[in-house]
Amino acid sequence: MKTKIKTLIKESRTLSEDDKQNYLKIIDFLPEENLKELLAILENEKTAIREFEESVKTQKSDINKKYIQNFKKLYQEEYKSAVKEEEKEEKNKADNILKNIND
């Protein structure tokens, strides 16, 4: 149990380096009950951080998907607009040619 606690202390993201060193120094002197409590706290911290990171990853993924969808929509709208403008220009050219032929 002490080895697992030591590993969790070293991996902790909420403890400062000084706090980590202090816990590592006193761990061999803590009673069994305190070790169990410390283990539970450190495991809860690790679980909470993992869940938080997964949540952030999911949110980032959702945001990226939404961005891509918006980008595709904007691209399609711009493409359609450009095609319509091109068609309009081509029609005007054709109308001018026909007008010149008829004159």
Image (cartoon, grey):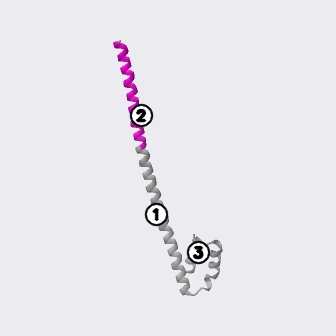
**Residue identifier under label 1:** 55
| Cα distance between the residues tagged 1 and 3 | 23 Å
Instruction: Point out the image quarter for the N terminus.
Output: bottom right
- Residue under label 3: 9
Q: Amino acid at mark 3?
A: Ile
Secondary structure of residue under mark 3? helix
Residue behind mark 2? 82
- Residue type at mark 1: give it: Ser
Q: In terms of sequence position, does the residue under pointer 1 or pointer 3 come before the other?
A: 3
Compare marks 2 and 1 and give the one earlier in the sequence. Answer: 1
Quadrant containing the C terminus in the rendered view? top left
> Which residue is farthest left?
102
Q: Under tag 1, what secondary structure?
A: helix
Amino acid type, callout 2: Ala
Magenta: main secondary structure = helix
Question: As drawn, which residue projects farthest toward the front?
Answer: 103
Is there CB contact under 8 Å for labels 2 and 3?
Answer: no
